[in-house]
Amino acid sequence: ESVPNFTITDSNNNTTSAIENCLSYATSKQALADYISLLSHINPNHIRPVIAFGGSYGGMLASWIRMLYPGSVAGSIASSAPIWGLPLTNFNIDGAYRVISRAVRLDYPPTSTATTFRHGEKKDDEVENGKDKQQHQQQTNYCFENLLASWPLISYYAQTEYGRSILSKEFNVCQPLKKKDDAWALLYWAQSPWFDLAEGDFPFESSYVPYALKMGLNALPAWPLQRACHASGLNEDLGIVFEDFNNSGDGGSIKDVKYKIAYGDGNIELHVDWDELTWEEMVEYSGDDDKDEREKINLLVQQNKIIEEMGLFHKLRDAVAVWFNVTGDLDCFDVLDTFGKEEEKEDSVNEVDDTVGKGNDALAKSKRKNRNLREEKSDHFLASNDSFMITPEQQQCQTKAESEGCWTPLCCNENMNLIITEARGLGGDFFWPPTHSRGTKTYNDIVSARSQDEQYQEVNEECADRNKVFGYPSPKSYDPWSRRLDDYYGGLRIDSQSNIVFSNGLLDPWSAAGVYAYGMDPTTPSSGETYYGPMVQNVTKDGSAIALILDLGGHHLDLMYSTEEDPECVREARRIQEENIAKWIHEWNESVEKRICLSPSCAKTVFL
């Protein structure tokens, strides 16, 4: 049974029923139980067929409610539902970033690159030898390569005061980058918006993702991810060359995170070996530090002429401005205030709309601003209404619930550990440096590298409940493998389920945690850069649960309003969903007739 979040006491000292552990009921299990309680009230005896719809976390709930309560829900449309992102159902620790990295390779607009089809109209040899293969062999989009080359170059410029001054100018930052750490803040700032651009990669202008991340009703442009690449010029061939680490053919490659990058005519050549960056020192040590420093600056001045002609830095700046300057009114970018302070990084885990924007630290400042505004409104309401009083503990609970929404409490209470954003820079995406040590390939590698104390400390930081107000489980009960959720909902073991349509948009990072037919996950590393498989996959053998693959779908695009700009895959997905809903309703009505014997033939049989 659900209980109010906090106690309210009126001026006569009359109180509602108090509750400690105010956020302990923020669980998926409780949410589903609440839905069923409501349905039982408004639909007595479950006569009328009920169809569940949900996207993102709502999609998870929509699929799970059909699995757990098939006697109350006739069927479910579960869009962008990452129920297979848990450790025991997924092995792609960098899956989200692989999806993003494939999406930046698309044309702008990307409608010309659609490849999915419904019933296998394209034969394998047609795909292999026909127009599709020719199109993908002719590279005209270098956004992936230019992004990958940007991060080591920023790190190289960060080594000297002069280099940092160039970065400050090229990226138009509000506060100059004075320290190496400031330049690292710039690097991570420029890496941070790509997840959100991919999530909101819709064919029309949309404020959905910015609004969910407390950036107001400011709309991203249509196809914002591809626009960031193409409108900025990052898609152009800038003359950047990736080569074997030492030209020896020793296997060095982007996949191995071991390569050499030559910029322009090669006057800057950087060597990347996992998380190490080296370059040939072109200024010989003379013993005179001042002289050597001047020589280094002179060299960088000459090198920077090539980089300026190339325009890599300002193209990257213009690309991320699609997100950071969504309002169009910024004069400069406040990199250090939004990304350079550790305390703001710690605040950045707060989300408003389910899984939207998970992992985006760069929005810490805007989130904190909006949270303070909301706190001021709450305080004003409580102070101006003399009939109510609230204790500091209750205020703390209310504020946390308002500021964080459901996602953080949900993850803390249930150990809902979606691992597809656990790693990046491991060789399958355009990020650098790697987030983990060389050889890290699985979630087990990550967990095994942490001591139990380190795991407990991590949980304490993410799910802090120092005053024992929120009711989060003890860190000692930490379940890194989300085994309890796997047991409760069944994990991969859904062969006996029915009447669920899962849909996954391949532009959406969360598609890496979606449900697919066995062995047909289009987001896995072995799938290559392009998915040529069917649009409809049978998740169960009898086809009563299916997965739809939307090659040009952003985050639950199929649940958005219909527009003329919708790609064909979305139109087809909605048609298939409608077809299944009609079938479920018909089957439910037939079942009701048999169950409560409403048909004339049944009545004759009974009364005779």
Image: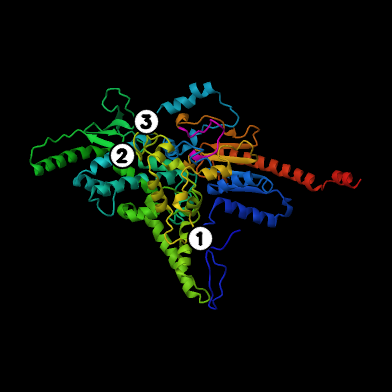
Q: Is residue 521 magenta?
A: yes
Q: CA distance from mark 1 to mark 2?
A: 47 Å
The relative height of residue 74 versus residue 278 in the rendered view (above or below) is: below
> Left or right: 496 with respect to 360?
right
Q: Is residue 470 magenta?
A: no
| Element type at mark 3 | loop
| Element type at mark 1 | loop
The relative height of residue 396 versus residue 434 in the rendered view (above or below) is: below
Q: Which mark is residue 415?
A: none
Q: Give percent across and percent down for residue 398.
A: 48, 63
Residue lying farthest to the right in this orientation: 608
Q: Say whether marks 2 and 3 touch (CB < 8 Å).
A: no
Residue at position x 30%, y 23% in the image = 250
The relative height of residue 182 versus residue 434 in the rendered view (above or below) is: below
- Along the polypeptide, which appears first: circle 1 or circle 3? 1
Closer to the camera: disc 2 or disc 3? Answer: 3
Residue holding disc 2:
150
Specify the amino acid type for callout 2: Ser
Any part of residue 375 in sight? yes
Q: Say whether marks 1 and 3 touch (CB < 8 Å).
A: no
Residue holding disc 3:
255
- Along the polypeptide, which appears first: circle 2 or circle 3? 2
Residue at position x 56%, y 49% in the image = 58
Q: Quadrant of the N terminus?
A: bottom right
Specify the amino acid type for callout 3: Lys
Q: Quadrant of the C terminus?
A: top right
Q: Give percent across and percent down for residue 302.
A: 18, 38
Q: Which residues are magenta?
A: 512-524
